[in-house]
Amino acid sequence: MPNIDDEIKRLEDEIHKTQYNKATEHHIGRLKAKLAKLEKVREERSRKGGGTGFFIKKGIYPTVALLGPPSVGKSSILNAITNAESRVGEFDFTTLTIVPGVMEYKDMKFRILDLPGIIEGANEGKGRGREVISVLRNVDLILITLDPFKYSVNYILSELYKTGIRINERPPKMSIVHKDRGGINIMTTGKVNVDEELFSAVAREFGIVNADIIIREDMSPERFIDGLTGNRSYIKALFIMNKSDLPEFKEAYENLKKQGIDPIPLSISKKKNIEMLKEKIASSIKMIKIYLEAPDKEENNNEPLVLRDGSTVEDVCRAIHNDFLEKFKFAQVTGKSVKFPNQRVGLDHVIENGDRLTIYIKKG
């Protein structure tokens, strides 16, 4: 009996060998649905199995990952934009672990991670690829880093896609309402055109028998499968072309531009565009400003606390001091996130831009 990796390989080969046309599109759609199901099972088994995978918990500040082939200068970039001291070497796989650093830009802070180089076959575990990619699911931004000698980006995009990471995309606009009977009904809103017969067949491959599936955008079968799978990660990405001071840079840069990719030209040795990179990182991640008020109202200052969008009162406590989390009683919030001024909230309350908070802690 073939194992799950063998079955995935068999389906990939069959999809690749099947010529796409009107007569085969339903067959290919069902094959892709079966493939997505198996990949999801493999990922779930991998998580349960534990192992030596990296785990990065979302912290107070946004997390940015440097991803790219070995030896394109990721460590040098990390050292240039943060307070980190990552080992810099001339050989592939210099970075064998994750090296973190903190980038400060204006009144904001960002956690930057230097990841081991990614090679072709990473989704199959080559070069610690699965460990590297597992980190990316919890970051806010990916910096895909290339240089004039290693600028073939397609394999990186393919490795990310195969592991369910969708860069610079939004989740599919669709919803599923399960029912007890009535079969599958594909419904659309506005002028949305989809192949209802194909989508119904794909849904059945996922074990959906009775449901209303509402689709709110023109959608390919691949996007529909992403929506049904439900485990995709949608992450912003920027492209960097390092070593822009070298003669080979121009040809590589123009090659990427022809592919519709507009990389940030960077030279660490010449200190070129380092501030531009920081600005691009900061503008790619939505941040909010909140204001802390002392309980007695006498020690207030107008300096905001800057955190990532979606932060909670717990994140605010961590940003101030761990004592505030350990001794937390409640918080009072005035602003957009609450229904009335000085509303009492707990640690899990999500704050919004411009909120004013007073945190009360236990004495002693």
Image (cartoon, rainbow, N blue to C red):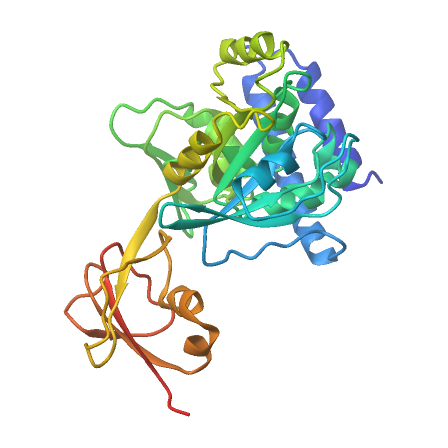
Q: Quadrant of residue 325?
A: bottom left
Q: Residue furthest bottom?
A: 364
Instruction: Classify residue 262 as left or right of residue 358.
Output: right
Q: Quadrant of residue 210?
A: top left
Instruction: Classify residue 124 as left or right of residue 347.
Output: right
What residue do we see at 59% from left, 40% from top? 78
What residue do we see at 22% from left, 56% from top? 354
User: Is 245 drawn above or below residue 131 in the view shown?
Assistant: above
User: Is 11 drawn above or below residue 134 in the view shown?
Assistant: above
Q: Residue furthest right?
A: 1
What residue do we see at 76% from left, 41% from top? 128
Residue 277's x, y, as percent?
46, 32
Q: Residue furthest front?
A: 270
Quarter of the image containing the N terminus? Answer: top right
Residue 66's x, y, as percent?
59, 37
What residue do we see at 65% from left, 41% from top? 115
Quarter of the image containing the C terminus? Answer: bottom left
User: Is 180 drawn above or below residue 285 in the view shown?
Assistant: below
- Report whether residue 232 is seen: no
